[in-house]
Image (cartoon, rainbow, N blue to C red):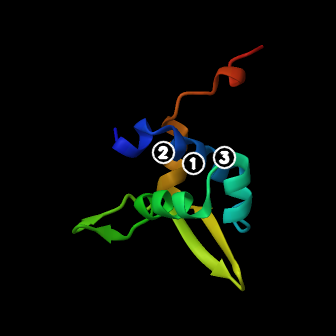
Amino acid sequence: MSALLEDSLSVAILRMLAQAPDDTGVSLPRLGKRLGQGASVLMRRLTLMGDAAIGGVRGPGWVRVVQHDDRWVAHLQAPGRAQVQTLPPLADENRD
C-alpha cells in the first residue's frame, strides 16, 4: 500500500474528489474549507498525489491540478478512482 494511503489527509482528499463530477473537479478553496486545510498544505499533498517527479520518483498520478482563469481545481484521475475503490468504507457508510 502506498504511504499516501496511510495518511488521513490524502485519503480525505481522494474521497472528496471522488464525489465531484469528472469534468468539474473541486476548487482548492472549497477543498480547503471542507477539509480544514490551507491552500499551501493542499498543494503540497496534491503534488505528491499527482504525476510529478520529486527527487527522481514519479508520483502515482491519482490527481491533476489545473488552473481555470484564477482558480486552481483538483481532478481525480483514473488511477485515483481505482485507489478510492480499494479504501475501506467510512464508518457511517456501514450503517443500515
Reading the image, the residue beneath label 2 is 83
Helix, strand, or loop for circle 3? helix
In this view, the residue in front, 40 or 84, is: 40
Query: In the rendered view, would you say 26 is above or below 19?
Result: below
Q: Quadrant of the N terminus?
A: top left
x, y percentage for residue 38? 62, 58
Which kind of residue does numbered mark 2 sit on?
Answer: Gln
Q: Is residue 12 visible?
A: yes
Question: In this rendering, is residue 69 above or below 37?
Answer: below
Residue for point 53% across, 68% down: 64
Mark nearer the N terminus (3 vs 2)? 3
Image-quadrant location for residue 72 = bottom right
Q: Tag 2: Cα neighbours inside 10 Å, few (<14), some, or many (≥20)?
A: some
Q: Which residue is mark 3?
A: 35
Q: How many labels sit on residues?
A: 3
Between the residue at mark 3 and the residue at mark 2, the CA separation in whole angstroms equals 19 Å
Which amino acid, by three-letter code, is at mark 1? Answer: Leu
Placement of the C terminus among the 4 image quadrants: top right
Query: In the orientation shown, which residue stands out farthest toward the left?
Result: 56
Q: Mark 3 and 2 residues: CB-CB less than 8 Å, in contact? A: no
What amino acid is at disc 3?
Leu
| Residue closest to the eye, 49 or 87 | 49
> Disc 2 versus disc 1: distance between alpha carbons?
8 Å
Q: Residue 82: image x %, image y %?
A: 50, 47
Residue reaching furthest to the bottom: 69
Who is closer to the viewer here, 83 or 32? 32
Label 2 or label 1, whichever comes before in sequence order: 1
Q: Which mark is residue 14?
A: 1
Kindly state the secondary structure of the residue where label 2 is placed.
helix
Residue at the spot 56% in from the left edge and 70% down from the top edge: 65
- Name the front one of labels 3 and 1: 3
